[in-house]
Image (cartoon, helix red, strand yellow):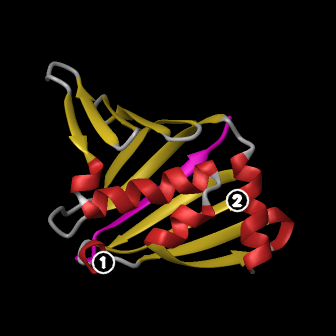
Amino acid sequence: MAAELEGVMRAFAHVRSSEARFEETRQMAALSAPVILKGRLEFVAPDRLVKRIETPRRESYTLQQGRLTLERSGEPDRTMDVDSHPALHSLSEAFRATLAGDVGALKRHFSVTFKSEAQGLWSMELVPLDARVAEHVEKLILTGRGPVLLQAITFEAGGDQSDMRITPP
């Protein structure tokens, strides 16, 4: 398992940038129906992540150098330091570290269970190590093929769940 995880992370480390489409279904106890978001994802190594939501409304989240910037049409941009928000920092690190092939960062923030499957498919369960983060996030399950992320499911401690399906170009 460790060698397979290292191999996938090495393959990710060689990807300098990537783009993909996504469809994310958010199920929240406070809502009677799921919320479906559609848009694009961009990654530029080592730490620039952009999530551009196109529907149901346009907004963009850019994470770079420990800062998260939210842009919404007609509103001033908002920027925050993710290090001051442990749950947000760990969630962002799950994606950044995976896409950058940084297994050390993953293991600093999460208990990592990696499973290799047929035809290059793999899955990784990430359970937060920090108790403050675990109060918000139960676990993440990432799946992919080689150095391509295909799905990210986030299970929140309160029962809410987000399932992002990623479609590479």
Does dot 2 land on a helix, a strand or a loop?
helix
Q: Quadrant of residue 44?
A: top right
- x 71%, y 68%: residue: 122
For the C terminus, the quadrant is top right
- x 28%, y 53%: residue: 83
For the N terminus, the quadrant is bottom right
Distance in Å between CA atoms under marks 2 and 1: 24 Å
| Residue 18, image x, y percentages | 63, 36
- x 48%, y 60%: residue: 94
Does dot 1 land on a helix, a strand or a loop?
helix
Residues 41 and 160: in front is 41
Neighbor class of circle 1 (other Cα within 10 Å; few <14, some 14-19, many 20+) is some
Residue corresponding to mark 2:
9
Extreme residue toward the top, this view: 74
Q: Amino acid at mark 2?
A: Met
Residues 158 and 90: in front is 90
| Residue 66, image x, y percentages | 35, 44
Q: Quadrant of residue 69?
A: top left
Q: Residue 166 in magenta?
A: yes
| Residue 162, image x, y percentages | 38, 61
| Residue 156, image x, y percentages | 31, 72
- x 14%, y 23%: residue: 75
Q: Is 40 rendered above or below residue 73?
A: below
Write down the region rendered in magenta.
157-169
Residue corresponding to mark 1:
134
- On the picture, is 7 further left or further right than 31? right
Residues 45 and 154: in front is 45
Q: Which mark is residue 113?
A: none
Number of on-image labels = 2
